[in-house]
Structures are given as structure tokens and as C-alpha cells.
Image (cartoon, rainbow, N blue to C red):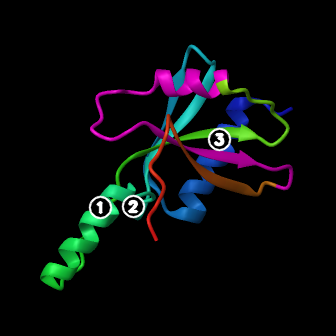
């Protein structure tokens, strides 16, 4: 298994060099002994289904597309060989700032042995499914 700090450094470099994220910083979570990366992506990563519906309604009414700016995201770097439980993820979510107006979410960054990073969006709790 790789050192979590090295994994975090690899993920931060990937976000900066390959995805053009800005305002990157390390956030240490004492409870889970993990280093997260916080940063600003170039575009919005996720739009809640309720917000999607209201944006579509506004777009139909006005004929103009609703612009949504990117928001800072927390990234949890993990190595593919690590074993995580629901309790481990819950500890990370519990440590995040709850002053935000949105539901808690993290971007799970899974680092492979060949330095490939795969990203997944994880949200705390239940999320309403997207309407087609």
C-alpha cells in the first residue's frame, strides 16, 4: 500500500496538470488521519436534480441558458489497494465543513499503480435520482 501523503500529492498534481484546477490546498483530517485536497475545478462538477429541473424551466421561459459557476470541491485521494468501509467514508464526511448550503459531497480520487487517477462523486446520504 502506498503512503497516503504520496497519494494525495499525486492526485493534487493530476488535478493541477491534467484538469487545470486552481486554489489547490491540502486539508488534513485528524479523525481519519487522511489528507484531502481542496480546490476549484474549471467547471461545475455536479448539479442537483432539483436544480437541473429549475434551470431547464428557466431556460425554456427565457430562452437563455442558466450559467452555473464552479464551486470548491473536496477530493479524497485513495490508492486502489486500500480497503475502505462505510464507517471510514462516514468519518471523512463528518469531518467536512457543514456550514455549506449544499449537501456534503467529496470527489473520490482513486490512484492506480500506473499513476492513472479515476474520479467518482460521492454524496452523503440519499440523493434524489435524476429525472429523464
The residue under label 3 is: 9
- Which is more toward the observer, 87 or 22? 87
> Callout 1: 10 Å neighbours few (<14), some, many (20+)?
few
Q: Which residues are magenta?
A: 87-114
Residue occupying the point 63% across, 54% down = 119
> Callout 2: 10 Å neighbours few (<14), some, many (20+)?
some
Vertical relation: 4 (above or below) 25: above
Query: Which sits earlier in the primary sequence, circle 3 or circle 1?
Result: 3
Q: CA distance from mark 2 to mark 1?
A: 6 Å
The residue under label 1 is: 69
Q: CA distance from mark 3 to mark 2?
A: 23 Å
Residue occupying the point 65% across, 21% down = 87
- Which is more toward the observer, 97 or 86? 86
Q: Is residue 73 magenta?
A: no
> Helix or strand or loop: what does disc 1 sit on?
loop
Vertical relation: 93 (above or below) 53: above
Q: CA distance from mark 3 to mark 1?
A: 26 Å
Percent coordinates x, y for residue 101 in the rendering: 27, 38
Percent coordinates x, y for residue 98 in the rendering: 35, 27
Image quarter (top left, top right, bottom left or bottom right) of the N terminus: top right
Q: Is residue 109 magenta?
A: yes
Residue that protrudes farthest toward the left in the picture: 62
Left or right of 37, for residue 131: left
Left or right of 85, for residue 47: left
Percent coordinates x, y for residue 9 in the rendering: 65, 41
Question: Do residues under tags 2 and 1 come within 8 Å of each other at their CB atoms?
Answer: yes
Quarter of the figure with residue 59: bottom left
> Which numbered mark, 3 or 1, is in the foreground of this view?
1
The residue under label 2 is: 44
Residue 34 disc label: none
Amino acid at each position: 500500500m502506498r503512503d497516503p501523503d504520496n497519494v494525495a500529492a499525486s492526485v493534487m498534481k493530476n488535478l493541477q496538470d491534467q484538469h487545470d484546477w486552481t486554489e489547490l490546498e491540502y486539508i488534513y483530517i485528524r479523525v481519519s488521519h487522511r489528507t484531502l485536497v481542496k480546490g476549484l475545478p474549471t467547471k461545475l462538477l455536479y448539479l442537483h436534480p432539483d436544480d437541473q429541473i429549475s434551470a431547464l424551466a428557466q431556460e425554456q421561459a427565457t430562452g437563455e441558458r442558466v450559467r452555473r459557476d464552479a464551486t470548491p470541491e473536496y477530493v479524497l485521494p485513495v490508492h486502489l489497494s486500500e480497503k475502505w468501509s462505510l464507517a471510514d467514508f462516514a468519518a471523512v464526511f463528518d469531518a467536512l465543513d457543514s456550514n455549506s448550503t449544499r449537501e456534503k459531497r467529496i470527489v473520490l480520487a482513486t490512484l492506480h499503480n500506473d499513476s492513472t487517477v479515476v474520479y467518482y462523486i460521492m454524496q452523503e446520504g440519499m440523493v434524489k435520482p435524476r429525472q429523464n
